[in-house]
Image: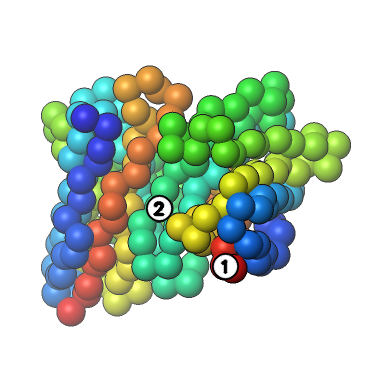
Amino acid sequence: QVQLVQSGAEVRKPGASVKVSCKASGYTFSSYDINWVRQATGQGLEWMGWMNPNSGNTGYAQKFQGRVTMTRNTSMSTAYMELSSLRSEDTAVYYCARSMILDNWGQGTLVTVSS
Amino acid sequence: SSELTQDPAVSVALGQTVRITCQGDSLRNSYATWYRQKPGQAPVLVIYGYNKRPSGISDRFSGSSSGNTASLTITGPQAEDEADYYCNSRDSSGNHLLFGGGTKLTVL
C-alpha cells in the first residue's frame, strides 16, 4: 500500500532553517508529484509547493518563494522540504502528499520555531 | 480572485443530508477536490475529479459543481463524518493549488 513516512518533530530558533523528509513506499516514486502543505495549530491547510521527483522541477507558492526549497533523492524514494529564515509564524505541522490531487498524505511533522 | 471560500461551520442532524460549498473563480475551469480531516490526523481525500471517490470512501459522499461553486454532499451522515472538510483546486495558472478555509461539520 502507498505510504509516506515523514521525519520527526523539530525545534528551531528564529532565523534558522529546517529540512523535513518524506519517504515514499508502495509505488513508483518518480511517477507522482510530491506536494507540501502546512497547518498551523487550529488553522486551515496552506499549500506550499510541488516537486516532480522525475525531473526535479518545482513550483512554489508565491508566499514561500525565496525561502523554500524542495528536493529529492530518487535512490532513496525520499522527498525533502527545506524552509529557511524561520519565524514564529512558521510553527506548524508540515505534510507531504502524493500527486496534484493529494491522494495520500504523510503523518505530518511538527516544526516549532521558538527562541 | 485566487481564493476559495467555505462556510466556517455547518451542522446537520444525524441521517439528514448536508451540502458543504466552496466558491471561487478558479472553480469555473478546474474541478474541486475535497478532503476530510479529523482532529490530530492528516487529511484524507474523499472526492476528486468529476465526482470520483477513492477506494474506501463511503458512497454517502458525492461532489458536484455549478459555475464558480463546488459542493460536497453527504447523504445520511453518520457520527464518524463529523470533521473538518477542505476544498482545493488548481489556480488559473494550473500549476499551483488553492485551499478553502475549511468547514467544520457537526453531526447532531
Chain letter of disc 1 in the image: A
Q: Which disc is residue A114 wearing?
A: 1
The percent position of residue B108, horizontal first and vertical second, equals 18, 79
Q: Which disc is residue A61 wearing?
A: none
Q: Are marks 2 and 1 on the same chain?
A: yes
Q: Residue at x 40, y 53 (%)?
A: A45
The secondary element bearing badge 1 is classed as loop
Q: Residue at x 59, y 27 (%)?
A: A58
The percent position of residue A111, horizontal first and vertical second, equals 59, 62
Q: Which residue is mark 2?
A: A45
Cα gap from disc 2 to disc 1, whole angstroms: 21 Å
Residue B17 horizontal side relative to residue A95, left or right: left
Residue B93 horizontal side relative to residue A112, left or right: left
Residue A60 seen in the current view: yes
Q: Nearer the viewer, residue B93 or B85?
A: B93
Q: Residue at x 57, y 67 (%)?
A: A114
Mark 2 or 1, closer to the camera: 1
The percent position of residue A84, horizontal first and vertical second, equals 62, 45
Amino acid under label 2?
A: Leu
> Looking at the rendering, which quadrant does residue A8 occupy?
bottom right
Q: Residue at x 53, y 28 (%)?
A: A59
Residue A110 seen in the current view: no
The percent position of residue A25, horizontal first and vertical second, equals 74, 48
The secondary element bearing badge 2 is classed as loop
Amino acid under label 1?
A: Ser
Seen in the picture, residue A102 relative to A61 is either above or below; the reply is: below
> Looking at the rendering, which quadrant does residue A14 occupy?
bottom right
Q: Nearer the viewer, residue B101 or B107?
A: B101
For disc 2, the neighbor class at 10 Å (few under 14, some 14 to 19, many from 20) is: many
